[in-house]
Image (cartoon, helix red, strand yellow):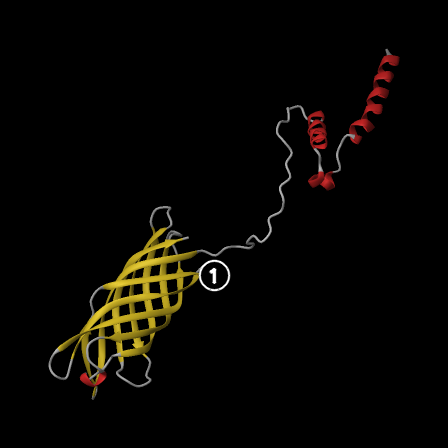
């Protein structure tokens, strides 16, 4: 009995080097032939109880791919209306109401709670002329700024308080020329912008809804001084 056991043990020891020799060079998998792939599968089968199926394939490394963390971006489409107050001189002001117009913003995350934005906003505003008629001016606004998306304590992670701040360029165009108005607005005018609002995610989707109270004030660099207050409400899509 001992002789049979020793003979079996010697046969197993003699087969171990042969089995190790059948293992292909793992450092050169890209150059494997079909024979080496099958030998590797056979090596796996010899050391596992479960059957191994499939094929050994070489996946080349990707070149020119993007690396690193991709920050989220967003696009916002909203409706906005505001009221503009003009400096009429002598401590007097004149109030002009603007129509409801579209507002398109695009932006992205600088950090998890800091975002940048830019876009376009359009509405129309009426202004009295010196001859007693009323002109309808087109008002185009190009904002640029940053906003803080802060999560209030005790609220879900999908709701934010928005704080906006930045600058904007206002362009007024319409019938007539500057000399036709007592407080002319025609042309390009820069301004400061501020906003305070609330935004919440719709279910577990990429859509959010927000509403803000926003204001602006023109730079004191000559021409008619003005400031405005308005309300914005719209949808945001993140991608």
In the depicted structure, whether residue 47 falls above or below residue 206: above
Q: Foreground: 205 or 19?
A: 19
Q: In this view, does 143 lie to the left or right of 114?
A: left
- Image position, residue 110 (x, y; %): 47, 62
Q: How many numbered circles does the render carry? A: 1
- Image position, residue 23 (x, y; %): 75, 32
Q: Which residue lies furthest to the right in this view?
A: 3
Q: Is residue 217 left or right of residue 100?
A: right
Q: Is residue 227 left or right of residue 18?
A: left
Q: Residues within 10 Å of mark 1 (few under 14, many from 20)?
A: few
Q: Foreground: 40 or 44?
A: 40
Quarter of the image for the N terminus: give it.
top right
In the depicted structure, whether residue 112 falls above or below residue 144: above
Q: Name which residue lies at 77% across and 30% down.
A: 22
Q: What element carries label 1?
A: loop
In the depicted structure, whether residue 119 falls above or below residue 4: below
- Image position, residue 146 (x, y; %): 40, 67
Residue 66 falls in which quadrant of the image?
A: bottom right
Q: Foreground: 27 or 33?
A: 33
- Image position, residue 161 (x, y; %): 35, 60
Q: Is residue 112 left or right of residue 235?
A: right
Residue 160 falls in which quadrant of the image?
A: bottom left
Please name the residue that numbered disc 1 is placed on: 111
Q: Which residue lies furthest to the left in this view?
A: 132
Q: Name which residue lies at 29% across and 57% down.
A: 234
Q: Residue furthest top?
A: 1
């Amino acid at each position: 009995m001992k002789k049979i056991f020793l003979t079996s043990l010697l046969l197993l020891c003699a087969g171990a080097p042969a089995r190790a020799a059948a293992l292909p060079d793992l450092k050169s998998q890209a150059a494997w032939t079909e024979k080496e792939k099958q030998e590797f599968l056979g090596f796996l089968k010899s050391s596992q109880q479960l059957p191994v199926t499939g094929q050994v394939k070489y996946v080349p490394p990707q070149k020119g791919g993007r690396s690193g963390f991709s920050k989220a971006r967003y696009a916002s489409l909203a409706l906005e209306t505001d009221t503009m107050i003009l400096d009429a001189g002598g401590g007097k002001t004149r109030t002009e109401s603007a129509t409801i117009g579209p507002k398109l913003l695009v932006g992205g995350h600088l950090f998890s709670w800091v975002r940048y934005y830019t876009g376009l906003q359009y509405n129309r505003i009426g202004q009295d002329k010196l001859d007693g008629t009323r002109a309808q001016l087109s008002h185009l606004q190009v904002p640029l700024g940053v906003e803080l998306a802060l999560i209030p304590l005790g609220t879900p992670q999908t709701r934010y308080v928005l704080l906006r701040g930045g600058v904007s360029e206002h362009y007024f165009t319409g019938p007539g020329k500057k000399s036709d108005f007592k407080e002319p607005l025609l042309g390009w005018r820069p301004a400061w912008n501020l906003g305070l609002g609330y935004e919440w995610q719709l279910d577990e989707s990429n859509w959010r809804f927000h509403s803000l109270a926003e204001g602006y004030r023109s730079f004191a660099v000559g021409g008619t001084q003005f400031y405005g207050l308005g309300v914005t409400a719209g949808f945001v899509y993140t991608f």
